[in-house]
Amino acid sequence: MTPLEHRQFGFLRVATVAPELRLGDPAFNADRTIEALDQLGTEGVELAVFPELGLTGYSCADLFASAALRAAALRALARVVEATRTRPIVALVGLPLEIDGRLFNVAAVAAAGEIQGLVPKSFLPTTQEFYEERWFARAEALTRDEIEIAGTPVPVGTDLLFDLAGRPHACLGLEICEDLWAVEPPSGALALAGATILANLSAGNELLGKAAYRRDLVVQQSARLLAAYVYAGAGPGESSTDLVFSGHQLIAEAGQLLAESRAFQFSTDVVIADVDLQRLTHERLRNSSFSAATAGGFRRVRVPLGEPAATGLRRTIAAHPFVPSDPAARRANCREIFALQATALARRVRHTNSRTLVLGLSGGLDSTLAALVAVHALAKLGRPAADLLAVVMPGPGSTDRTQGNAAALAAALGATLRTIPIGPAVAAHLADIAHPEGLHDATYENAQARERTQILMDVANQTGGLLVGTGDLSEAALGWCTFNGDHMSMYHVNAGVPKTLVRHLVTWCAEDEFADPVRSLLLDIVATPITPELLPAGQNTEDAVGPYELHDFFLFHMVRHACGPAKILALAELAFAGRHDRATLLRWLRVFVTRFFAHQFKRSAMPDGPKIGTVALSPRGDWRMPSDASAQAWLAELETL
């Protein structure tokens, strides 16, 4: 992916730098800063954030009163600023600056050979190991909003926002160290005023446990403000008279940690990540609390920015966005999802006072998960597993493996099993409507699904039961269900779980929740190919509709992040490199878009079911879409690819 594509798809490359530092030597520190800019330039970085007071060092203490040090810092700043003239990068550097007889701790924004603005620190810690008010004045003590440096007027103040020219939605706001730790950080107002990227020039010292707290603070602030937060901490070159500095650097985006430094490196340490500005803009557009809030007046500075070097995307794109790659996180997610599903179902059973839970058990993944959830829900209510009525309904396409697993699973769980073959009833119905014998079309397949649903509904009425639906989120997205067939139930317990996650949930149940014989049965069900078993000759769902791992990827990025087909394809090519080629991705992306639009009418009539993750398609909750919306704009974009 080239930088042109970065801009097209809303990516901006940012970096944090903890340069090698020599305390009280601005010339040396400017050299290291410029060297870092040279390195970052070759890597296509467009915004570089350096530590607080990085041109002098944060821990100079009473040396800040020295006119010689301050003059040297200004000369160092001039060199860094000039270095940006021939480098397409915005550099944020820190220095002490005297204004009208007061000394301020400021961040300078340098780009295109000019100082674009100066932002002073708002909150000065003066407690425990910190003593900043001994040297510096707070930002509120500023007496003007513009100063002259080397004969050039420069805006100064905490009310500055910096728009990066040619980068849509790239608006920069600045904080300095303690500002983030304040009760009301300036970044809140900056974000509400439009800042999508929040940079923090910091020099927080290190203490036992502080790094984890700082990480949580940065990640949570990025989540709260729906922004990218770029945090650059001063490195171990700072004074160790009483404190230790680690060079902790963090880049977070809307609650997701994108990159983090190794820390405690005496040499220059760099962290780079690509932030997704389109994603952040979408998050804000869909957040009513954000749109309802207001911010005071801010001055906008347009920052010129040239063409960065062409390099690949510096961002991990998960092939399975619904499934954590870390095994411990995956297990924790499965445990929580299972509890959500079971609690939701138990609540519905309490409300309806149902005597039984009725479920069609096919031997496939979805109905297996629903059965496991049902047994757990009954246990929550202090009721026996026998109150689950598992109905096995063999038809023309049923196999011994799936039917055997279904019956064995019901027995192993302690559920009540009923076996009701559907072949004779389906044959009679097809004869009644004069359907040609031997024609295995959609009517033939759907008649089986509707016959099974009729049986389940009637058995539920017969036993005072609640019919538990088994279809999942991926099937709802694709419309891969028979309208008024398996599409319908009295409670849709898997409605919020995508297919790629269903498999992991069943596997987790086998490994963590159940012993043999249930465990062995579950593992065999996980290994069984996905099939609706509606044709005598057998059928594989993914051969017909496409790989579910691709459809779940498309679903996540289209619904969660509102990505268009071109961006989805670009991300998919990165995520599935070496597994699916471009032609394959395009083929199934076209299928996904077509089916997603064509089958909205099924989602408009979905039964109740619990929301599980950030992607949900309930017409009463997350997804409101007209059933007659056209897919033409999406398909037209696909044709250009």
Image: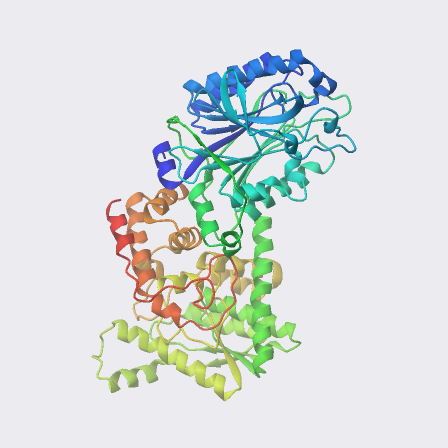
Query: According to the image, what is the colour scheme of the structure?
Result: rainbow
* 634 vs 494: above or below: above
Question: Which quadrant: the C terminus?
Answer: top left
Question: Which quadrant: the N terminus?
Answer: top left
In the image, taking residue 362 as reference, residue 130 lies left or right, namely right
From the top left corner, tell me how far across and down residue 16 is, in percent.
Answer: 55, 29
From the top left corner, tell me how far across and down residue 60 is, in percent.
Answer: 70, 19
* Residue at the bottom extreme of this rendering: 462
Q: Which residue is nearer to you in this view: 509 or 93? A: 93
Q: How many numbered tags mark residues here?
A: 0
Kindly tell me whether residue 255 is visible in this rendering. no
Image point (21%, 84%), residue name: 434
Q: Which residue is nearer to you in this view: 455 or 19? A: 19
From the top left corner, tell me how far across and down residue 262 is, in percent.
Answer: 60, 30
Kindly tell me whether residue 507 is visible in this rendering. yes
Q: Which residue is nearer to you in this view: 68 or 22? A: 68
* 315 vs 255: above or below: above
Image point (66%, 15%), residue name: 24
From the top left corner, tell me how far across and down residue 429 is, in percent.
Answer: 29, 84
Kindly indicate the quadrant of the structure image that contains residue 133. top right
* 112 vs 124: above or below: above
